[in-house]
Image (cartoon, coloured by chain):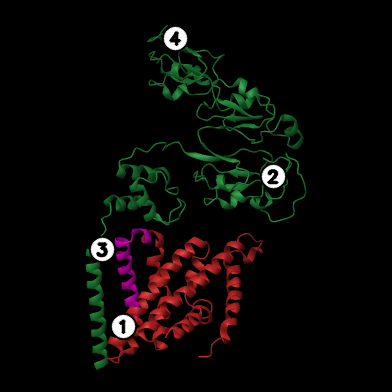
Chain colours: A green, B red
Amino acid sequence: MNILIISIVIMAVLGGVFALLLFYASRVFHVKTDPRVKKVLNVLPGTNCGACGYAGCPALAEKMVDGKEEVTACIAGGEEVALNVGEILGVEVKGAGTKQAARLHCAGSSSHSQELYMYQGIEDCNISTHLADGFKQCDYGCLGQGSCARACPFFAITMSNDNLPIVDEKKCTACGICVNTCPKSLFELVDVDKHVHIGCSSPHPGKFVNKVCDIGCIGCRRCVKVCPVKAINMKEHLAVIDYEKCVDCGLCATVCPRKVIFDSQAGKRNKMQITSECIGCGICKKVCPVGAISGEKKQLHTINPDTCIACGRCQPKCPKNAIIPLKDIADEDINRSD
Amino acid sequence: MIGEILTLSVVAIFVNNIVLAQFLGLCPFFGVSKKLDSALGMSFAVIFVMTLANIVTWLLWTLVLVPLDMQFLDTIVFILVIASLVQFVEMAIRKTAPVLYQALGIFLPLITTNCAILGVAQLNILEEHSFIMAVFFGLFSGLGFTLALLLMAGIREKLELVDVPAPFKGLPIAFIAASLLSLAFLGFGGMFVQ
């Protein structure tokens, strides 16, 4: 009985002493923290996944409040979290809404490209690349051993049967891990609303490319010539799209003799027509990259179907929704006012 | 005295290495030995807390528990001490040395649940060390933990580059490497007969 009482007293006293000590310590050693840190922490996912590069959500929240990290830094949270954090910190979220995804700048799958030698080693691009720049004759070619697929934390990359990674743009969060993993730097983060991309990274002359790969860019410049907005530049013997200028019209994809420019919207675009709803504001005229729209101010504008490249840029800009695809025009009476 | 301390250092760091010979603190040993820098951060936090915990538990043991004949309360009292101590140290460091706080980061609060700290405190009273020896025992045990963790981190960083058979990838091969490392440390066993 005595032992019981003494042990209870000891524990109570010790507990009390430590509690008091901690209480005073928290007063004495109080560090003023920004109250916004707690608020930011509440809107972060709280899974401490570490995809942002910090040790858990609290560390990221502090960096965000300090302004050392963008409000869009939370990869797992995506746009929604970025908007919430932006609201707390009074930062306008830039670029939110233009979701990005990784694109592969190589189409040289096993069946399209030539091998340099038989590789029998560890199935990992980052290892096999050390042996004579990889086992493909093209030193810019995808080695197809799936290092990117294994590195992707969101399981957005799968390997095709022809040993080429396929990015699932719905799952891709544009975290950039595959960009850094690929030893050939074949991935690029591109806005998902840009549907056209060039599947080659080789700046070698066409003669060499022709020999090692039957799909690589040979530098014929046909896409450069056809581009209405001069968005395609030549990097040595390789065509590169400048996505700042690209209007996503898909013309380059139609002229490429090697079919190495891919356009996921091919055949889905329509030429445009202006209905009688037009008030002649002239906005569409300004956004048209090829000058296919004509008309005086406050007069009905028209689109020349011969010059229209079906890029569709004018449609969302029209304040009156008077621009509709050419195919559906039969449903509308465009000459109602005449 | 100095000779005693030197002997203790060899015994605590090599012969009775806290991880590789006594198998304490295995959770952080495998948990944070993937990268050298995080292993280093964890090690410093352990050295720090282990030494402090040894000082406080030794004082409590000799001044409170032994005079009152309440030795059986050691485990619960020590846990209480370690938990409060870690909290206290975290607050103190955050205020006085923000740089150190940043460096130790998440590892400091994690140490509360590190069994090596409690284990060393228990061994300390079991071996009836004097106060000064208790302090050094904590310090050297922490250094032993550091040595094991850094060796393991180095090995695991190399293991990443090796073509390990699929079933052994990750933790299994780490366990095998740890067991070999432990066997190697058993070689120190015959150095001192206590």
Foreground disc of the pair 2, 1: 1
In the rendered image, the vertical position of residue A291 relative to residue A178, given as above or below: above
Foreground disc of the pair 4, 1: 1
Looking at the image, tell me whether mark 4 or mark 2 is earlier in sequence order: 2
Q: Nearer the viewer, residue A235 or A84?
A: A235
Q: Amino acid at mark 4?
A: Gly
The residue beneath circle 3 is A29
Separation (CA) of disc 4 from disc 2: 51 Å
Looking at the image, tell me whether mark 3 or mark 2 is earlier in sequence order: 3
Q: Residues within 10 Å of mark 1 (few under 14, many from 20)?
A: some
Looking at the image, tell me whether mark 3 or mark 4 is earlier in sequence order: 3
In magenta, the rendered stretch is B77-100
In the rendered image, the vertical position of residue A36 relative to residue B43, given as above or below: above
Query: Looking at the image, which residue is at 62% across and 20% down?
Result: A225
The chain under label 4 reads A
The residue beneath circle 1 is B59
In the rendered image, the vertical position of residue A295 relative to residue A65, given as above or below: above
Q: Position of residue A10 (x, y in %)?
A: 25, 84
Does the magenta run of residues contain B91?
yes
The residue beneath circle 4 is A295
The residue beneath circle 2 is A162
Q: What is the chief secondary structure element of the magenta stretch?
A: helix
The chain under label 3 reads A
Callout 2 and callout 1 share a chain: no
Q: Amino acid at mark 1?
A: Leu
Q: Residues within 10 Å of mark 4 (few under 14, many from 20)?
A: some
